[in-house]
Amino acid sequence: MSEPTQTFPVPESPATEVISTGLPAPTTTSAAPARGDVPVHPADAAYLPATEVATRAADGDPSKPYVTIVLPCYNEGRHVMREIERITAAMDASELTYELLCIDDASTDDTLEVLHRAAAEYPHIRVMPFRRNGGSGTARRIGTQQAHGEIVVWTDADMTYENERIPELVRILRDDPTYDQVVGARTTEEGTHKWARVPAKWLIRKIAEKLTNQTIPDLNSGLRAFRREVSLPYLRLLPPGFSCVTTITLAFLSNQHDIKYVPTSYAKREGVSKFHFVRDAYRYILQVLRMVMYFDPLKVLMPPALWMLVIGVVKAVVDMVRHPFYFPASTVLLIVSGIMIGSLALLSDLVVRSRAGV
């Protein structure tokens, strides 16, 4: 989503602080104690119930699953059980040990109740309810931090991705250590506003390919598997919305982590899409530029700086020939702007290369 389902006990150790929420504790979470290597960040504690925060103690379970499937759910009550059945059937038929971490992102329908019923029926499910809506990026980030598995799989609960192929993606990582991420590259587009999404995604993908010098068949696929330990330094870069998948792709590529793309189909989604074309397309473009600026600002800033300088110098020569010793304000503005942007590019590159972390 075999061990019996159990609830998370609240540790009685006086050293463990419980964050009180004033809300009743969830009736069903599951399987194994949470890892102690990635504590809950204070900003993330607002999303989790008190019992979930309190159990981030030392890891005492020697039999952790190999795979953690992070499944964000927001108002997916009508079809999430079918998705759970499909994922668990594929994983149970494989040789892989796994847990299915279902994150309810403060749904307003009966999604949480459905997940609790599923956890009682399927022993590999772990339910993590959020107290307030944080977005799919927040759900994936916290889910990856609290995953027990060595391999983390991201997917959606809307019946769009070929989740029965999750074992195939995981086996690629298991059998080939040269890859750190495997992405299900969609060969079709079945989302809403298809007439606008296809050219917009193509343009954003081409910008990302140009800035990263990499071929990217699918920049924002929601079906992917990656090594958890490799991803941990980049999780703090993830935005709360849909562009988190774009971010994790660019973060891996910018740091020479190889990604393998596996062609997959993409079905029409069940339920109502949470994607807003104008707002989310803008965020995708902004996130691509932000990530490239974070890792290699010269690629973003130096080309316009050089173009401004070249155009300004050429214009200055023409102005000198036409009107000796007269430089219009536009010529001066081009040259000064080019120098300023170029200086900013060099300064940004110096900051990137001098920082100790990722």
Image (tube, rainbow, N blue to C red):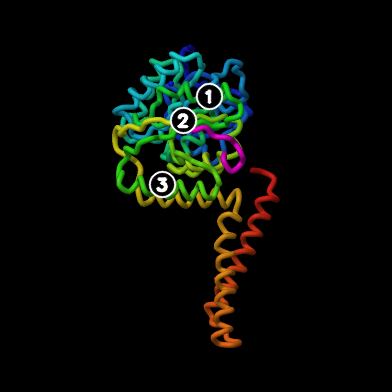
N-term mark: 2 or 1: 1
Relative side of 345 to 147, left or right: right
Against 207, residue 339 (above or below) is below
What amino acid is labelled 3 in the image? Trp
Which residue is denoted by mark 2 in the rendering? 262
Residue stretch rendered in magenta on the structure: 252-261
Quarter of the view holding residue 314: bottom right
| Residue occupying image coordinates x 47% and y 12% | 4
- State the image coordinates of residue 65 (x, y, percent, origin top left): 54, 19
Which residue is denoted by mark 1 in the rendering? 172
Other residues around mark 3 within 10 Å, as few (<14) / some (14–19) / many (≥20): some
Residue 259 lies in magenta, yes or no?
yes
Against 244, residue 117 (above or below) is above
Measure how far apart labels 2 and 1 are at the Cα level: 10 Å
Against 271, residue 88 (above or below) is above
What amino acid is labelled 1 in the image? Ile
Which residue is denoted by mark 3 in the rendering? 202
SS for tag 2? strand
Q: Do callouts 3 and 1 mark residues in contact (Cβ within 8 Å)?
A: no
Q: Do callouts 2 and 1 mark residues in contact (Cβ within 8 Å)?
A: yes
